[in-house]
Amino acid sequence: MLLITRDSELQRAACSALEDALKRTHIEKQKAIARFDEDYANLLLGCESVAHALLAELNMWLLLKEEKPDEAWNHLVDAQMASIYAARAHDGFRHLEHHHQRLEAIEHLVFPRQVFVSSGMLVGFQECSICRRDYDGCEHLVGRPYMGQFCYIIARDIDLDHVAIVEHPADKRCRVERFNAEGGTRNRMTWKIEPDATDA
């Protein structure tokens, strides 16, 4: 189903099946966590990540067929990130590197080149999502799985410092979507000039 030529109704049915699988996997993961079975919980985290990657890619193709490239791009990025997460979740998913390479190829072959931006921030306190302590003083590592969930930083007391154009952003959804053109703004995906909202 991961092709633009596939029937949209069949792709939507596949999305529904994946959503059902996600619900069942989440329930099973909660049972593994309750048993303190970390290896199995992380394996199921990997299963969830794979399902998220497939679901996001299916939605990308559906949105492209509906001529919604900006929304489709966000789903592509979700699929790329989920495939990386799956490989990190458990050794059983390390083989997914080739799938991530395929998604990278789709980015360059299907979508126009993007201009990415990144914000520089001053963070007063970094909290660990696992233990809720100061990240600098805890034993957890960002991006690593712990009992069925990934560690990430919760930034506190944030002040925006600057915004810059970058080649390799932390989040590819942070990009220049439009720029000023005669008659309005030009959409970088469609190249269509859209009237300025203030002119309406």
Image (cartoon, helix red, strand yellow):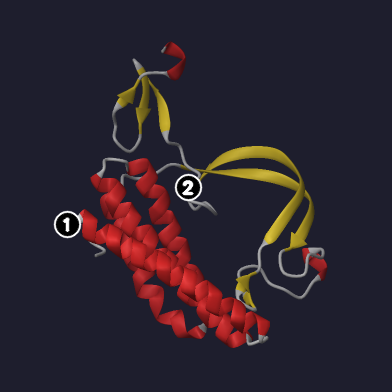
> Which amino acid type is marked by label 1?
Thr
Taking the image as shown, residue 7 lies to the left or right of residue 73, namely: left
Relative vertical location of residue 117 with respect to residue 91 in this rendering, above or below? above
Percent x, y of residue 1? 24, 65
- Front-most of 102 and 133? 133
Is residue 165 visible in the rendered structure shown here? Answer: yes
Percent x, y of residue 96? 39, 76
Closer to the camera: disc 2 or disc 1?
1
Give the residue drawn at x 45%, y 80%: 93
Give the residue drawn at x 42%, y 62%: 80
Sort mark 2 into few (<14), some (14-19) or many (20+) by Cα contacts within 10 Å. some
Percent x, y of residue 70? 37, 41
Percent x, y of residue 57? 34, 59
Which residue is under mark 1?
Answer: 5
- Front-most of 20 and 148? 20
Which residue is under mark 2?
Answer: 173
Real-space Cα separation, disc 2 to disc 1, in angstroms:
25 Å
Q: Earlier in the sequence, mark 2 or mark 1?
A: 1
Q: For the view shown, which residue lies furthest in the top direction?
A: 199
Which quadrant of the structure image shows residue 181?
top left
Q: For the C terminus, which image quadrant? A: top left
Give the residue drawn at x 35%, y 62%: 16
Is residue 87 visible in the rendered structure shown here? Answer: no
SS at mark 2?
A: loop
